[in-house]
Amino acid sequence: MPDLKDFPDVTQMAIPFFVAAILLELFVIRYLKRRGDYETRDTATSLVMGVGNVVSGLLLGFVAFGVLMWAWQYRLVDLGTSWAVIVLCFILDDLRYYWYHRIAHRCRWVWAEHVIHHSSQHYNLSTALRQSWTGTFTGMFILRIPLALIGFHPVLLLFVGGLNLVYQFWIHTEAIGRMWRPIEWIFNTPSHHRVHHGTNPRYLDANYAGTLIIWDRMFNSFVPELDEDLPRYGIVRNIGSFNPIRVGFHEWIDMGRDAIQPGLSIRQRLAYLFAPPGWSHDGSRKGSAALKADYVAQNPEAAGMPGLPNAETGVESPAIAAE
């Protein structure tokens, strides 16, 4: 049975792999003519955001770890660190990640830190490193408290969380097409994650998985990638900047401005903080549901397709059978 001291920080250990993989992908795209592209300023911004994420983790990581250690005092049992426990912990933490990720796209407070990862209009392995500097401030680390109370040690939780993030690195590529069908059915793959990064109406708010795509299939958030509608990357309103400070804080600033504008009720101010992205008190903006409805209105033949609402009911169709 592994000892707690044997669980390393796998994300930092993987940094040489990240660099080598980016260089390999660049070679494959440039010389083997595989799908994908790199833009120098965009890649540099992603790398700076990645370094900043590591620094913020070193400076603020004690907050989340301290909360989990506090919760650990009240655990039901100590499940230990057997291999079976590690596997179970990974699966449950992957489910936790799914719900964090889904909340991040449906609550502006969390979206303010997560939007950084979606801000690149390119999709390559460097995009995987474009991470937030402000994740601690959202407080979403509390989603791990139930796992600590069940009996998974915080060190183990951080270890499996790191494995999950390392897994997600390689799926940020256009150079790999669809994979063997059983893999596509169970695991998150480049094809599935390209959908998640797409701004096409059908792809908004889809495929939240970390490692296992089965969660999206179970909770009706899965949408397959279509060759006739390849993903367009970025965010609905692209910021048009390579400045890391602008990339890292633009949504926090915009959200604050919205919430403090004069003439709003307390409920409206709170909605600007916690309602889905795109909400506005006067209806001047559109969220993902409205963008999907507009697309169907303009393309009625697409009504009811995966990720798009039925023209009559306004309800999205289950996507599993359509894959």
Image (cartoon, rainbow, N blue to C red):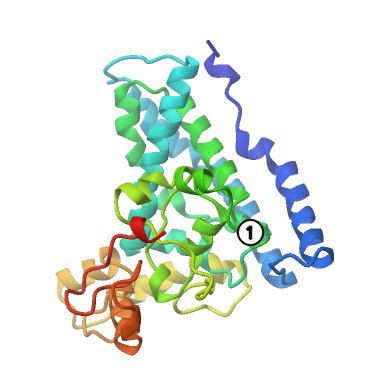
- Expressed as whole percent of the image width and height from the top left, the position of residue 270 reads 22, 66
Is residue 188 or residue 55 the one in the foreground?
188
Up the image or down, 154 lies above or below 13; here it is: above
187 or 302: which is nearer to us?
Answer: 302
Q: State the residue position of label 1.
A: 173
Amino acid bearing label 1: Thr
In the rendered image, residue 160, in percent from the top left (x then y), is placed at 50, 32
Label 1: how many Cα within 10 Å (few below 14, some 14–19, many 20+): many
Q: Position of residue 118 (x, y in %)?
A: 51, 65
**x, y percentage for residue 278?**
32, 75
Nearest to the observer: residue 113 or residue 66: 113
Q: Does 233 sit left or right of 272 as displayed?
A: right
Looking at the image, can residue 158 be seen? yes
Q: Is residue 139 visible?
A: no
Residue drawn at the location 42% of the way across and 33% of the way down: 91
Looking at the image, residue 264 sits to the left or right of residue 102; the answer is left
Residue 271 horizontal side relative to residue 319, left or right: left
Name the residue: 74% across, 54% down: 22
Q: Is label 1 in a helix, a strand or a loop?
A: loop
Q: Quadrant of the C terminus?
A: bottom left
Looking at the image, residue 143 lies above or below residue 193: above
Tell me if residue 54 comes above or below residue 23 in the rendering. above
Which quadrant of the structure image shows residue 58?
top right
The outermost residue toward the top is 1
* Count of numbered circles on the image: 1
Q: Nearer the viewer, residue 14 or 60?
A: 14
The residue drawn where x is 36% and y is 41% is 96
Q: Is residue 272 above or below residue 189?
A: below
Instruction: Find residue 207 and report its image quarter.
Output: bottom left
